[in-house]
Image (spheres, rainbow, N blue to C red):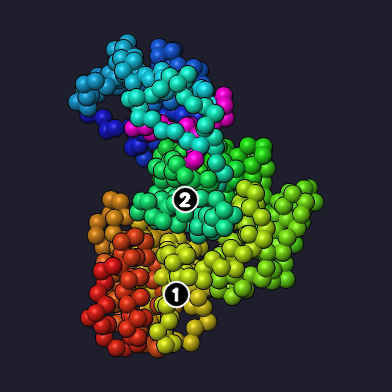
Amino acid sequence: MHPEPFEDSRRLTGCNVYFPGTGAALETAAGLPFQGEALARWRDRIDVARKALGWPDDKVVVREHRSGASLAFAAPSDQLYTATEVNEWAWWSAALHGAGAEGFLALHTPGHAAIWDADSALRTLQAAARAEANPALRALQREAARRALPFLPDDDAVSIGAGDGSAVWAMDALPATTAVDWPALHAIPTVLVTGSNGKTTTVRLVAAMTRAHGWHTAHSCTDGVFFDGQTLESGDFSGPTGARTALRQRDAQAAILETARGGILRRGLATCSADAAVVTNIAADHFGEYGVHDLDDLAMVKLTVARAIGDAGLLVLNADDPVLQRRSRTLSCPIGWFALDYDSDELQAHRQAGGATCGVREGALRLHYRGDEHDLGSIAAMPLTLQARAAYNIANIAAAALAAAALGVAADTIAGTLLRFGDARDDNPGRLQRWDFDALQVVLDYAHNPDGLRGLLHAVGADQRAGRLAILLGHAGNREDADLRAVAATAAGFRPELAVLKDSGGYERGRGSGEIATIMRAELLRSGIGEGAIAVRLDEVKAARCALEWARDGDLLVLPIHELAARDRIVSLLDCLQQQKWRPQKPLPEACGDAP
């Protein structure tokens, strides 16, 4: 009996890393031995299936990488489930070419294409394509494309236009193209935000700027979907579902959409039309999934957002990131560069060529856009920068300023927002939130990879502290062991007097309870952190309480919290402690439970 030769098979429902349309992709099984002949056979079978199904001869992509290959091809938007069946059949029969039918029979499921019999397989695939075909959907899609309107389908519904220029229909009740009130439909100013760190903060900043501009704004991020700052949905909505939900808000006049790596790889972009897109940076994270093994692979995925930028849009990139500098050379869309140094060689050259830039000169943030230069104010006066110590937030601010300018937000409005945003703790929940209890400082953040954690610890003065440092450490389970060790090693470099190891509830992703803590503990010990300085509290709330109970005046507690419900409980606890005037080394008041 043969093992399954692929580990993931999926629909690509929008512009994606492989091509600008819809299709299907699969990842070959890790460790599966195959030669180039197998890939050629797969291509041949895709061609055969397309001819049998009457599909156009469109893009086919083979991307070989260190753990196998990603195999993708373009397919009609109304037959994507069938396309995944085609892909699986083509790879099964190509990878195991010449094997006997007996091994396949044990794995075969009735209704799926017979791997050992091409004629039978094609008849099965033709039947699947006929059953799935939706001519009304295709007709609407063609007409929306002709009119340059956003077209957003999912399994249950399809919408055309966006925000206050959108209409939504159930998938089983689609109208004829002649029944649509096309003049009432239009796009709204839209920004896509991706990168390794700073996505949510940048989304919130741009959304605050568009609201200050006077637009009712929907935004989606890892915390949920929001309209004019009010929660519509809670949870991680940084993928296509969150983007569609935001874009379908009937009163929205702008949409700012966090666009995470996982959603891009699994489904593609929810919309392939945006006025601006931001890539904040490229940092080591999420290696090992979908053939992403290094920074260049990750940059390739993040830069998928460039497909959504037309000639009139702006792709906002980090000039301080060498990977983005290198990968940008293959792009043709307009680019705006941001950097910490407004007068860096890269930004000066880009301005001289007529390009948009943003960065810091003599302590002030400066924006150059469409030939005009604007002073946006002192970065030390902008709350998010912690008196200019949080370099990563200076970068996020510069990126947001460029994106907002690309939407038409006035420089004065951008500057005013930057001087206010972050004053209130709830402006940027879960990111650089701070509480003081006499001389004890408590910082809650989302830092989840080495670069993010290092930047946070520098920003809050962990490398220049007078007192002791406690830090919570955990991670999502879909990271490689090396990624987990790298986070622990980064923390160890700041020599914490207490490291509390935890799980991230709901993010175990195949790992057992405590498995991540065990890996991180070993790395802390290897890095010279003593056993007495390590505690394990797998529940995030209990981990935070452990640090608070340990703390004394002058200490610094850094609490990276990743699960939304746990964060809400910890914020509620810290707010209550502050209201109760709790002081370090005192028992935590019973009145301050950990429930919100």
Q: Is residue 184 left or right of residue 531?
A: right
**Image quarter hosting the N terminus:** top left
What residue range appears in magenta? 146-164
Amino acid at dot 1: Arg
Q: Position of residue 331 (x, y in %)?
A: 64, 40
Q: Is residue 514 left or right of residue 376?
A: left
Q: Position of residue 340 (x, y in %)?
A: 65, 63
Q: Residue furthest right?
A: 352
Above-or-below relation of 184 to 114: below
Q: Is residue 518 left or right of residue 45?
A: left
Of residues 50 and 150, the one drawn nearer to the viewer in this rendering: 150
Q: Which residue is mark 2?
A: 219
**Image quarter hosting the C terminus:** bottom left
- Mark nearest the camera among 2 and 1 is 2
Q: Quadrant of residue 152?
A: top left
Question: Could you give the CA–CA distance between mark 2 and mark 1, rounded to whole angstroms?
Answer: 24 Å
Q: Secondary structure at mark 1?
A: strand
Of residues 279 and 233, the one drawn nearer to the viewer in this rendering: 233
2 or 1: tag closer to the N-terminus: 2
Q: Which residue is mark 1?
A: 434
